[in-house]
Image (cartoon, rainbow, N blue to C red):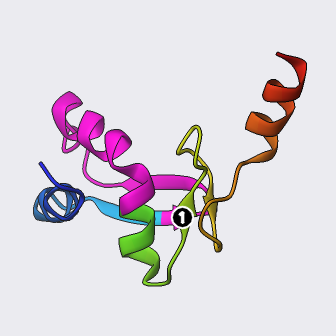
Amino acid sequence: MTAQQAIEEARSRGIVLTPAGATLRFLGPKGALSKELKRELVRHKPEILVLLRGDPTYPCVRCETFAFHEADTVCYWCRKVRREA
């Protein structure tokens, strides 16, 4: 399943996806979010955030968790862990 397909599947189930910083929030009917769909949404979170925002954002190049407006950015957490390692 692609990021776009995951968004479409969520919407077909009445689930509203909202980007909130580096977080993806879901709101929908009880039971609409299956374990499989949640797994796909989490797996494609950086791409989904970009698609929902409509502006170019890029994930951390190491952990792919946080979104930045510049490509090839490393998040604070990854920089800190690397220095201590």
For disc 1, the neighbor class at 10 Å (few under 14, some 14 to 19, many from 20) is: many
Q: Position of residue 71 (x, y in %)?
A: 59, 67
Instruction: Indicate whether 52 appears above or below 23.
Output: below
Q: Nearer the viewer, residue 16 or 67?
A: 67
Location of mark 1 (residue): 58
Direction from residue 75 to residue 80 in the image, left or right: right
Q: Nearer the viewer, residue 74 or 43?
A: 74
Direction from residue 42 to residue 29 in the image, left or right: left
Instruction: Indicate whether 66 appears above or below 71.
Output: above
- Is 72 in the magenta? no
Q: Secondary structure at mark 1?
A: strand
Q: Nearer the viewer, residue 14 or 35?
A: 35
Which residue is found at the position 54% from the left and 64% from the top? Answer: 58
The stretch of residues the image draws in magenta is 19-47
Which residue is found at the position 13% from the left and 60% from the top? Answer: 5
Q: Amino acid at mark 1?
A: Tyr
Picture quadrant of residue 36: top left
